[in-house]
Image (tube, rainbow, N blue to C red):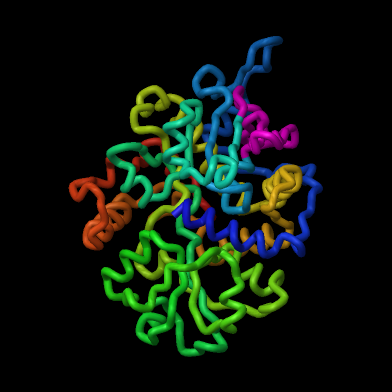
Amino acid sequence: MQKIKALLLLGTVLALLMTACVATAPSANESESSETPAAEAAATAAPEEEGTATGPLAGVCPDPVVIQTDWFPEAEHAALYQLLGDEYTVDTDRKAVNGPLISGGAATGVGVEIRTGGPAIGFQQPIKQMYVEDDITLGYVSTDEAIFGADDTPTIAVMAPLEKNPQIIMWDPETYPDVETIADLGEAGVIVNVFAGGTFIDVFVSEGILSADQVDPSYDGSPARWVAENGAIAQQGFASAEPYTYENEIDEWGKPVAFELIHDAGLELYSQSLAIRAADLEELRPCLELLIPMIQQAVVDYAAAPAHANAIIVDAVAQYNDFWVYNEGLAEFSVAKQLELGLIGNGPDATVGNMDLDRVQGVINKMVAAGLDINADLQADTIATNEFIDESIGLP
């Protein structure tokens, strides 16, 4: 899924490059957060002695904690940027954002480095990059990637910052007023333009939601065909981006699109789980027991007050000065849509960041049924765990 996302966004942003507007001023204020056990530990840590880092993570976690993302900074990654205070730096050569790791408004004793994915790592999937650079602590790994990589690049997801995958199939509501779901597109025989190789397409064809003859795997990420055909085709995208850009930044279109989440159509994978290399579990266990609740709280804090993290994201993208652009309007739309659709949300209970292992097993089963080349005996608890989740932390 990360590979598809990278190619999708690459084509779209190249088409928008000449007209996009990027705001660069970071916020000076951090959002307030309710205290959790991990946050209380950070807030009550002993004063730092000269030359010695102190805090709940000092000597427990790697310093810095290195997190490999799947793309340039964007609001879908905001829980990570919420861990930064105002004293962050942007490394434009390495495309990484660094700073003291903050929780509950206090330093934790270690730093955090958030690395850009996509072209910055040669479009390598984070799950593979984790096995190239052994200093990566956590990487974004989607459920289907973890399933495909279970034998060669085994990982264990330890938290899901996003509850739902933002990937969608979209269509023009004026052209297809009676279409409400992806299954309706299938029944109507509408051509669905997608990148080749997506897990969801294989599953949907296997399940009869779409037919193979209506799937066109020639999508290149550009809006050109959609515009040229005046919305006669359906197309893949992301709920937290394309509806905004197509209505507000593509002058040739300039109107709303309709869509359904891949998640709501039946493939309920976690798209940006934070995962570790499977072999690192015992070594990282003491760190993860403290760190993961801090990231859970960062999700809650961002949902309540997104301005600080959004400002860092917009500022970092501006400093990178690459083809990828990201403005305040898109960031604000993204977080609003994430909350509206439950992309950011609690798990199957009142806890944020935990994973439903039955749901993970369901993805495995669907991929097996679709005839994909995976280990048919794979079990969900091999690739995901809720061991480090603080069940008291959740969205209101």
Quadrant assignment for the N terminus: bottom left
Check if residue 61 falls in the magenta segment.
Answer: no
Check if residue 99 falls in the magenta segment.
Answer: yes
Instruction: Indicate the position of residue 288 as horizontal and vertical percent values.
Output: 45, 31
Residue 257 as seen in the image, left or right of residue 192? right
Q: Residue furthest left?
A: 377
Instruction: Indicate the position of residue 123 as horizontal and vertical percent values.
Output: 52, 46
Residue 357 as seen in the image, left or right of residue 354? left
Quadrant assignment for the C terminus: bottom right
Number of marks drawn: 0
Residue found 46% across the figure and 26% down from its top: 134
Instruction: Indicate the position of residue 276 as horizontal and vertical percent values.
Output: 41, 34
| Magenta part of the chain | 83-111
User: In which quarter of the view is residue 208 placed?
Assistant: bottom left
Residue found 34% across the figure and 28% down from its top: 279
Residue 35 as seen in the image, left or right of residue 168? right
Q: Is residue 108 above or below residue 188?
A: above
Q: Is residue 348 above or below residue 123?
A: below
Residue found 59% across the figure and 57% down from its top: 10
Q: Nearer the viewer, residue 322 or 2?
A: 322
Q: Nearer the viewer, residue 192 or 54?
A: 192
User: In which quarter of the view is residue 93 placed?
Assistant: top right
Q: Nearer the viewer, residue 287 or 256?
A: 256
Q: Is residue 196 above or below residue 305?
A: below
Residue found 37% across the figure and 63% down from its top: 200
Instruction: Indicate the position of residue 191 as horizontal and vertical percent values.
Output: 43, 79
Q: Nearer the viewer, residue 18 or 240?
A: 18
Q: Residue furthest front?
A: 218
Q: Is residue 320 above or below residue 244?
A: above
